Amino acid sequence: MCGTYRYKGEEYTSYSIVKSYREGKTVRKRILFPLGKLSETQVEQIRLILKVVKGKEHILSSIENIIPLKFLSYLEVTVANQLWEDWQIDQAFNSHKITNSPISTPLMARVLTINRCLEPTSCYPIQDWVKTTALPQILNLDPGTLNDDKLYYELNKIEANKESLENFLFNKTYQLNPESYNYVNYDLTTSYFVGIKCSLSRLGKSKDNQPHRRQVILAIMVNEDGYPFKWDVLLGDTAEVTTLKDKVKACRDRFHLKGISLVFDRGIISEDNLQLVDEDEEKTLKP
């Protein structure tokens, strides 16, 4: 209970712990402990103590008094994992080219993809990164199984499923919007390496302003909606103008696209490529 009083023109609040009792038909209060003047923090603490005393099982506290012992990334990994589920990407893998085990090839690909989306890193720290997230609980995953040998073994399996993944994403996005393939965008970029152990890395024309670094070339094709459906990692000294023929052939023969417009920048332009487009104008591409 609290009451106010005035002293020398100032108003003060005094607190007491009281107990209610009935005297005949009248409810009265008995002061058990006079507490005097208290700060707001002291008042809140005493109120919490009294609530705990009144309860039999509940322990009450304020949020400020709760100290987490461990932080796990939850919301972002849950959203990324749900996107994988919504797109049913597990179905993209060829059943004859995967590891069927508790840590399967699709599961490993899922973990690596979520990592690349949220906190890109090399393979070595993946095990430690997974431990900082809710993925072990969401995927029923033992982080201890994500050792280097397992990671690199599954990376080879994932690469073996590259064409299956491309076909799956093409079919999925084509069904969503066939008209998004009226225009196909094609571009390349480079990614450099600090070491020398990548067999595809070469010294070449760098787009990272790192001309002294060995690099690889990354090529990608996306539809008008921005969905990727074909990609390649090429030797670091590959000339851009030499990469188009393969992509035209894939559009025509594998994806059966006809009458599309292929959009690319001036780095791809050459006499041979323009002739290639002219030859395929009626079959596949519009110039």
Image: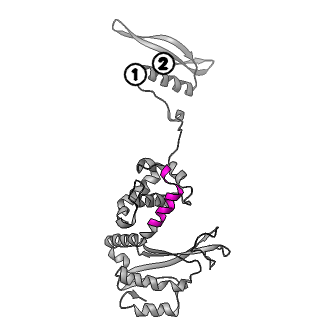
Label number found at residue 104: none
Q: Is residue 253 visible?
A: yes
Q: CA distance from mark 1 to mark 2?
A: 23 Å
Disc 1 designates what residue? Answer: 56
From the image, give the main secondary structure of the stretch colored magenta.
helix
Q: Amino acid at mark 1?
A: Lys
**Which of the 4 image quadrants contains residue 249?**
bottom left
Residue that appears at 37% across and 87% down: 284
Indicate the secondary structure of the residue bearing disc 1. loop
Dot placed on the residue nearer the N-terminal end, 1 or 2: 2
Indicate the secondary structure of the residue bearing disc 2. loop
Residue bounds of the magenta highlight: 144-157
Quarter of the image containing the C terminus?
bottom left
Front tag of 1 and 2: 1
Disc 2 designates what residue? Answer: 1
Residue that appears at 54% across and 83% down: 240
Q: Amino acid at mark 2?
A: Met
Any magenta on residue 32?
Answer: no
